[in-house]
Structures are given as structure tokens and as C-alpha cells.
Amino acid sequence: MFLNSNLPMANMGSTEASAGKFAGLKVSLAGVGKLELTQVLFKNSETSIYATSRPGLVLKTFDMDCGKPDEVSYGPYLSYGVEVENFQDIQRIDELRSRVPAYYGSNLDSERQFGYIGMEYLQGQNLLAWCQMAAAEGYPSEWTDQFRATLYETLSIVRLFHKHDIILIDFKPDNVIRLFGGAVKFVDLGAFFTPRHNRETEKYVYSATPDYAELVIDTANVQTGLPLKQGSDIFSAGVAFFEMATGDSRLTMSDECAETLLGQPGNYLFRDSQIKDIWRSYSHLKDLLPLVHTQLKERRILFSELWHLLKSYLASQVEEWESLSEEQHGQMLLDTGTAFIADQLPIPLQWLAEPIARATTLRSFRLKSVADLMKMIGEPVSESIQEDIARYNGAVQMARDLDPPVTFRQPMNVWDVRINPQTEHWALSSSLAASELWQVAEFAFVKEFCRDEAGHRFFQIVGDLEADFHQGDKLTLKHLATDHSAWLGA
């Protein structure tokens, strides 16, 4: 097993850095032809994203130069191969293909010692940058509504990956892009744990950012051949939510609390011994995964250590702790941790404290599925709206008429519906309708009937002869699957 610290990509600010090592090179992609790499858009220690001479297409490059003409650097070579395989796996899954950048192929240039993957350039912002912009503006109310809907959509994509037995492992906000139209796509496919890896665990390249992972648990599982589970992604999601809200992936601890814990070494010495074991296997993590003792000294605590510290602290402070049940332990731990997290969140986002706590707590008390986390984020519509949709909406009627019939998930959320100004009935978002009717979405023909003042378009399901045209073909629900301005009505 090779473990990659997988540091986030950073913008390259200087002119020299923007040019990039491979700028000006011409490469070939099957089915695309020759391309020229122009300038670096993003860069980290081993990979770079280059703009190219073809608009809308970027190349992710893996620098494999090790200083020897007939050899390549093993780490980047391995990372390149894993990401190519993951892209190819996803291309075979129709539901997931639209949730990642379009894939244009890959190639390995042995002479120039680098590999490259051609992919779609996404017009949008990563979730962390999007949230930081909102923080600078004081969290406008319209944005907070969009934020909740975006979190829900992001989780729905995670759930879709899990449906196909793919664990993301390195889920973090700068690996999720919110397009300017509102849709969400995932980037950086190098860490996925797929059914292929489940069959060949010994060949899996475990790649995670320490702040978003429970390395003590996951590295032990991978080393012993145990498959990674949903709990890893649920944990990462909770940390990601906290970072989106605060700008930091680690928690701050007061001087008084930190000194109290430091004065009780039994609270952290065993965890420190486990961290040192990881250092012995992966020496490059020494600076990225500090000892709990160091975290307490610095007053910055990893989520992977927070709950162990809190449990030890409560055990030492609550006189009747030993007589309490495991369920009571879990509730007391959650209550304490939720309050601790809430104190660090901005007021408009303090509702996130409980979802963050339930997602990151010890695995025995953690939410069991992403669907459970989605319920905590959702904002259900009223019963009257549900009744209107059930009675008049064409997509729901179509679902009922299928054999076997399809039941839409209940309850729907406020961002899933919009009033049709022409019919005065509620329309469903095309993305929700497409996800529920995915098996028949490419055969569900649609026609636009009206628009509202904000430019949202309202469609109806029609026969193929009545359908609108789209790129030389008939428009279907599948074409609207990620269109946040499209709605299906009566």
C-alpha cells in the first residue's frame, strides 16, 4: 500500500509559476488530436492543471521526473495510473458520468517523463472558495438558502457513488465544484475505493488528506485487507461542512480546556502511540499528522482526535460515568461535542453543528448512511405542496404509470419545487425528476411551455413528435439532469 498525503491544489500566483514546466508542449489525445499546453491553472507538488489550445479542455499532468533518463518517479506514476482507471470505471456508469468532468482520454509520455489526463474545464468555484466569498459578504440570506441546497445536492452525489459501491475517501470542499449555473461536480478522482479495489485490496493506493480522514482506522483496515466503508466519507463530509463554515478544517480549543487535557496524559498517550506507528510507516505524514499532545499545545485539534479527547475528558469529570449505559455515553458525548462545534460556527450557519457532530463522532455513534445526513440538511416542503405535486405533476404521474411504478422520495425539499406561473401548480426540478426516473430519463421527451420572470424554464413530458430539439436530437429529461433552471410541471 502506498499512502499519499494528497495536499490540496493551490492557485499559482506568479507569472513564472503560471507558465509551468510543461507550458508550450504539444501532446496528442486519441479522438481529440494535437493540443498545446498553455498555462498552469492549479498546481501541487506532483500534479498540475493546464489550460490548452482547445477551449473547454484542460490537462491534468503528473510530473514523473526523478532525475534519471530511463526511470520515472514511482509515486506520480502510480497516482496517474490510479486516476486513469478511476475515470474509466466511472465512464461505464451512466448515472455518475455527468457528475464528474467529461473525460477525453489520457497518455503517458515516457521520453518527457510525465503523464496527462484530458478533461472538461468546469466553469465555477470550488465549495471552499464559494463559502469564503459569502463569508466576506456577511452570509446574505439568498446565499444561505443556496448553501443548504448545494450541501444536499453534494451529499446526493456522494450517495450515488455509494449506490455503485464507490467510496470517495478524500471528500473535501476544494474537490467539489459548484458550476455557475448551480449544478455540482466532483473533481480529483485519485482516491476512490471502487469495487475493483475491493477485489484487490492489496493493490489499492490509499490517498487521503489527514485533516479529513481517520488515518489510524483507515490505514489499519487497508493494511489488513479490510474494505473501506461509508463511515469514512460521512466523516469527511462533516469535516468539510465545518471548513466551509469556518475556513478551517481543525477546531480551536480554549487555553483552559487544552491545559486541563494536557494535565491528564492518560487522555491522549495511547492515541499518540498510534500516530507514531503511522509515522514509522509513512514518514512524510509527521508534519501533517501531529501528535495529540502537539495539537493541544497549538490549540488546533483534528476532528479525528476531538471525540477521543472529549470522551476521556467526560470520563474523568462525570462521577457516575462508569454506571451509565453506552447509549447514555454516546448522547452525552454528542451533546458536549455539538455545543463545542456550535461555538465556533458563524451565527447564520450554527444549524450545521448537529450534522457535523453526528457525522464526525466516534464510529459507534456515527450516522450509518449518507441518507441519514441528508435528512439533517433537508428542508421538506409543506403537505399542501406535496399534495399538489402528487395530483398534478406530469413527472410523478409518469412514475406511477411505469411497470413497476416508481415512488418519488418523500418528503421533497423546498429547492426541489417552483411554482409554474402559467398553471399555478408546483413544478419539480428536472434534476430531482431525472434522478428518480433515471432508468427511463432518455426516453422521457420534454417540451418547454413557459418561463418565469427569473428565466426559469418550465417543461412538460410529451410524445416524441412534440418534443423540442436539442443538438440535432429530441430533448429528453436526461438532457436536463443537471440543469438548475429547468422544471417539470403539469
Image: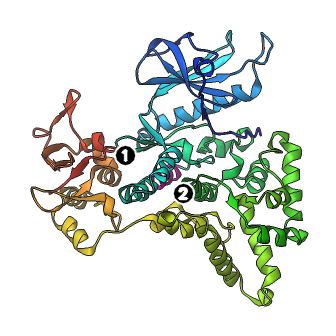
Image quadrant occupied by the C terminus: bottom left
The residue at which mark 1 appears reads as 182
Q: Amino acid at mark 2?
A: Ala
Q: Amino acid at mark 1?
A: Gly
In the rendered view, would you say 359 is above or below 331?
above
Residue 128 belongs to the span the image colors magenta: no
- Residue at the location (34% across, 44% down)? 482
Along the line of sight, the residue nearer the viewer: 27 or 299: 299
- Residue at the location (88% across, 72% down)? 264
Helix, strand or loop at label 1? It is: loop
Answer yes or no: do the residues labelled 2 and 1 have beta carbons within 8 Å?
no
In the rendered view, would you say 471 is above or below 452?
above
Q: Which is the main secondary structure of the residues drawn in magenta? A: helix
Image quadrant occupied by the N terminus: top right
Image location of residue 180, percent across then percent down: 37, 40
Q: Quadrant of residue 14?
A: top right
Crowding near the residue tagged with mark 1, few <14, some 14–19, many ≥20 C-alpha atoms within 10 Å: some
- Residue at the location (62% across, 45% down)? 193
Helix, strand or loop at label 2? It is: helix
Can residue 336 be spotted in the picture?
yes
The residue at which mark 2 appears reads as 245
Q: Quadrant of residue 408?
A: bottom left
Which one is in front in this view, the residue at disc 2 or the one at disc 1?
2
Left or right: 309 as drawn, with respect to 60: right
Q: Which residues are magenta?
A: 154-164
Image location of residue 44, percent across then percent down: 66, 31
Left or right: 17 as drawn, with respect to 202: left
- Residue at the location (69% across, 15% down)? 113
Crowding near the residue tagged with mark 2, few <14, some 14–19, many ≥20 C-alpha atoms within 10 Å: many
